Amino acid sequence: MKPRTRARSLALQVLYEIDIANHPPADIYKERLEEMPLSDDLAEFARQIIFGVLPLTHDLDQLIAKYAPEWPLDQIAAIDRNILRIAFWEFAVSRETPVKVAINEAVELAKLFGSDSAPRFINGVLGALADHQHEITQIIQKA
């Protein structure tokens, strides 16, 4: 697994546990880092994802629902929902990751953690969202 993919994987595991069990983010992050040690820069990248996504979870979910209405959020598996949030945050909020890279990384995470159909699903949803990247970035900045 590529180094930044490992960092995204750690971030995904933390966000998933918060989503499912509502455990304290800082504690989960620390525990996952102990289980999957990362270099300082990769640990910081994972931390930025986690604490970038968390305060915007509701906004990200609303935008996913708006721009991908054929996929109701309440019917999306928790792991897939968090993969979407991470990718969406990366290309629409942090904007340090090119859209294609964020989508490819999300598909890789879906292959590792999701169901057999998850990679195609993730690719489809993010493809729909990517078409509205600039609009979405403006909406998030106002939130």
Image: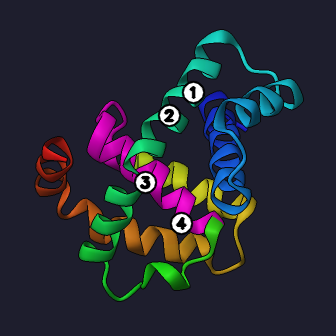
Of helix, strand and loop, which one carries label 3? helix
> Residue 134, position in %: x, y?
13, 51
Mark nearer the N terminus (4 vs 2): 2
Disc 3 residue crowd, few under 14, some 14–19, many 20+, Cα 10 Å: some
Q: Magenta region's main secondary structure?
A: helix
Residue at 64%, 21% (x, y): give it. 43
Mark nearer the N terminus (3 vs 4): 3
Q: CA distance from mark 2 to mark 3?
A: 10 Å
Q: Is residue 140 left or right of residue 19?
A: left
Mark 2 vs 1: CB contact within 8 A: yes
Find disc 2 in the rendering and name its residue.
51
Residue at 53%, 66% (x, y): give it. 81
Find disc 4 in the rendering and name its residue.
81
Mark nearer the N terminus (3 vs 1): 1
Query: Considering the image in quadrants, where does the N terminus appear?
Result: top right
Residue at 42%, 85% (x, y): give it. 72
> Residue 49, position in %: x, y?
50, 35
